[in-house]
C-alpha cells in the first residue's frame, strides 16, 4: 500500500518508460556530468650528490653510495645518485692524484654500477670546491621545489661548522649522514646540534616531501676499507684489495701514489 500523498500536490503525472530515460524537449534539466577526476601531483625524483676528494675512490665509497641508493629505492619518484669529486678541497692537504685522475678513477669505478654516475662540475670551476657553491649551482638548475640531498660521512658531518657558509646548506639541500658503528652522532658540536634541532628525519620518505632542510641518518655496516690504507699500499708498490679492478689497473699504469707518503684523507 502506497503512502498517502499530501493535498495540494496535484494529480500524479504518469511518465512513459521512454520519457523516463530521455527528458522531453521542454525539460530544462541537463544530464549530470561525471565528477572530474582529482589530479594528483606526480612523484618527484630525489637527487642525491655524494661529495668528496675520493683520493682514490675505493670499495668503501661504493658501499656507501649503494647503501644510500638501496635505502631510497622505494621512494615513489625513485632516486638518482651522483659522485661529485672535489677539484680543490679546502679542508685537507693536496690530493695525491690530480682532479682529472680522481674523476677518471670514479668513472671507472661506477662503470659497472648502472645506478651511479659522476658529476664533474667542481672540476670546471676555478674557485675552491666549496659545497655551498655546488649546491647553489644545483639549486639554480633544478629549481626551488626539487628534492635535493647531499651525502656525507659522519666525520665530515661532525666537522660541518668549519665549512664555508655551512649554515646555508640546510636551505639548499637535505643532508644524509652515513654512520658506521663506533661513530656516535649523539654528541655534536653545540653549533651543529642547534642547527639540526627539529631537522632529524625518522624515515627517508621525508627527503622526497620537501626540497631541503632535513637530516637523515643512514646506518652503515662496518667496512675495513680506507683511502689511507689504499694509498699506503700503492705507495709501496702493492696491489690494494680495496680498489675496484679497473681503478687498480689505472692507478698502476699512471704510477699514482708511488713512493708518496700516505697523508690522511678520504
Image: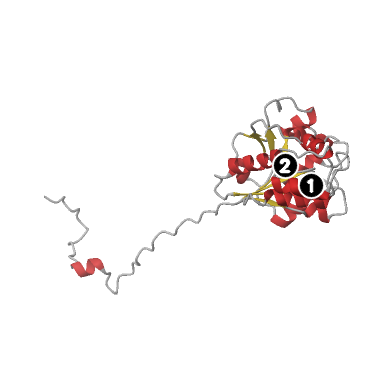
Q: Is residue 44 left or right of residue 180?
A: left
Which element is circle 1 on? Answer: helix
Seen in the image, is 78 located left or right of residue 107? left
Is 142 or 238 nearer to us in this picture?
A: 238
Res 175 seen here: no
Pointer 2 or 1: first along the chain: 2
Residue 17: quadrant of the picture:
bottom left
State left or right for residue 10 relative to residue 121: left
Residue located at (36% from left, 63% from top): 32
Q: Label 2: which residue?
A: 243
Element carrying mark 2: loop
| Quadrant housing residue 124 | bottom right
For the point 66% across and 30% down, the residue is: 222
- Residue 226 % position (x, y): 75, 35
Give the x, y percent position of residue 181. 67, 27
How many marks the image carries: the answer is 2
Which residue appears at 64% of the width and 45% of the height? 210
Q: Are marks 2 and 1 in contact (CB under 8 Å)?
A: yes
- Residue 142 visible in image: yes
Q: Residues within 10 Å of mark 2 (few under 14, many from 20)?
A: many
Indicate the position of residue 216 as horizontal and vertical percent values. 65, 36
Crowdedness near tag 1: few (<14), some (14–19) or many (≥20) residues, C-alpha within 10 Å: many
- The circle drawn on residue 251 is 1
Q: Quick one: 127 or 148, which is closer to the camera?
A: 127
Amino acid at each position: 500500500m502506497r503512502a498517502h500523498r499530501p493535498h495540494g500536490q496535484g494529480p500524479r503525472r504518469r511518465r512513459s518508460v521512454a520519457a523516463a530515460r530521455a527528458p522531453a524537449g521542454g525539460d530544462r534539466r541537463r544530464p549530470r556530468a561525471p565528477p572530474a577526476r582529482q589530479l594528483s601531483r606526480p612523484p618527484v625524483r630525489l637527487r642525491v650528490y655524494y661529495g668528496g676528494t675520493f683520493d682514490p675512490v675505493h670499495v668503501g665509497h661504493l658501499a656507501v653510495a649503494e647503501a644510500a641508493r638501496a635505502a631510497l629505492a622505494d621512494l615513489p619518484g625513485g632516486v638518482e645518485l651522483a659522485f661529485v669529486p672535489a677539484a680543490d678541497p679546502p679542508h685537507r692537504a693536496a690530493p695525491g692524484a690530480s682532479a682529472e685522475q680522481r674523476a677518471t678513477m670514479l668513472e671507472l669505478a661506477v662503470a659497472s654500477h648502472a645506478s651511479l654516475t659522476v658529476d664533474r662540475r667542481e672540476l670546471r670551476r676555478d674557485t675552491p670546491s666549496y659545497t655551498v657553491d655546488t649546491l647553489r649551482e644545483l639549486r639554480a638548475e633544478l629549481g626551488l621545489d626539487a628534492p635535493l640531498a647531499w651525502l656525507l660521512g659522519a666525520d665530515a658531518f661532525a666537522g660541518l661548522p668549519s665549512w664555508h657558509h655551512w649554515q646555508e646548506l640546510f636551505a639548499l639541500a637535505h643532508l644524509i649522514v652515513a654512520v658506521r658503528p663506533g661513530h656516535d652522532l649523539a654528541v655534536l658540536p653545540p653549533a651543529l646540534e642547534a642547527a639540526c634541532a627539529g631537522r632529524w628525519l625518522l624515515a627517508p620518505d621525508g627527503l622526497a616531501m620537501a626540497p631541503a632542510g632535513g637530516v637523515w641518518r643512514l646506518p652503515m655496516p662496518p667496512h675495513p676499507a680506507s683511502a689511507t690504507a689504499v694509498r699506503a699500499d700503492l705507495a709501496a708498490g702493492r696491489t690494494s684489495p680495496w680498489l675496484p679492478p679497473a681503478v687498480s689497473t689505472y692507478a698502476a699504469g699512471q704510477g699514482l701514489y708511488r713512493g708518496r707518503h700516505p697523508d690522511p684523507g678520504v
